[in-house]
Amino acid sequence: MNQGTVKLAVISVAINLFALTAFAQTPEEKGLEIAIEADKRDEGFGDSTANMIMELKNKQGDTSTRYIRIKTLEVIGDGDKSMSIFDKPADVKGTAFLTFSHAIKPDEQWLYLPALKRVKRINSKNKSGPFMGSEFAYEDIGSQEVEKYTYKYLRDETLNGIDCFVIERYPAYKHSGYTRQIGWINKKEYRPEQIVFYDRKNDLLKTLTYNSYQKYLDKYWRADEMYMENHQTGKSTKLAWMDYKFRTGLQDKDFNRNSLKRAK
């Protein structure tokens, strides 16, 4: 190989290295890309209804069960609207919870308490509190819009035999109860398999596991079970979902403060 050929080869390698460097994604860019794709895969469902059984378990293993109906309305360009209506047991029957999720500004949430016959607005600074005594916080209940977090790709990892992206996300909301969350995202379906939450002191707080996914309308994945374990208190909450129906004709008027009072 003559000197000119060597020089051309060196230049070619340098150009290729520069191109690779110039177009290589940062961990932050890749994390955001994964989050955007996961969000895009769930667009277009319109509205849905489902029944849910919430099982609360304390550190001693004692359990209590609640029966809830869920209604959800997809909002294009913003967060979804949802309503949870408690049917059983008697002490919570008629309680209804309304959430207007938002992409950037704080979610709006209201709770109707039938014993008091009044609607209580949840303070936007108190979203880290437990929802109806469960291990799910108020901020866990709203739809998880991409803009609510910043992201960072950490690694690829297999979880329970499933190939996953592992990404870290940081709440953009300053009053969040979390410093960060680590999510395992199914590489094939872009659905969450597990999320680990860290509290304001950056200590491990709880783990959310998604089990037994079902596919609806040949596109939308929903977990039959969501299990939240609090590592600091020893308590846990299991949500068992059933009877999903999509595109049922729900409208904006079905999701307002007045509809909370007449929810049946």
Image (cartoon, rainbow, N blue to C red):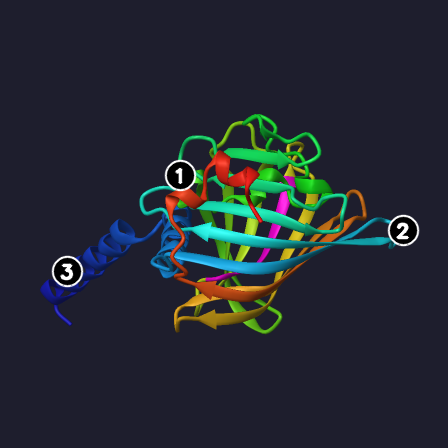
At which x and y percent is residue 243? 56, 67
Q: How many marks?
A: 3
What residue did someone put label 2 on? 60
What residue did someone put label 3 on? 7
Q: If you read the primary sequence from the N terminus, does the residue marked by circle 1 or circle 2 appear first?
A: 2
Nearest the eye: 16 or 231:
231
Q: CA distance from mark 1 to mark 2?
A: 39 Å
What residue did someone put label 1 on? 103
- Segment colored magenta: 191-198
Q: CA distance from mark 1 to mark 3?
A: 53 Å
Which SS type dominates the magenta stretch?
strand
Q: Is residue 140 magenta?
A: no
Residue at position x 70%, y 43% in the image: 205
Q: Is residue 196 magenta?
A: yes
Query: Is 61 located above or below residue 189 in the figure?
Result: above
Few, some or many residues within 10 Å of mark 2 (<14, 14–19, 20+): few
Residue at position x 37%, y 56% in the image: 46
Residue at position x 34%, y 58% in the image: 44
Q: Is label 1 in contact with label 2 (beta carbons under 8 Å)? A: no
Give the amino acid type for the residue marked by disc 2 in the picture: Gln
Q: Is residue 201 visible?
A: yes
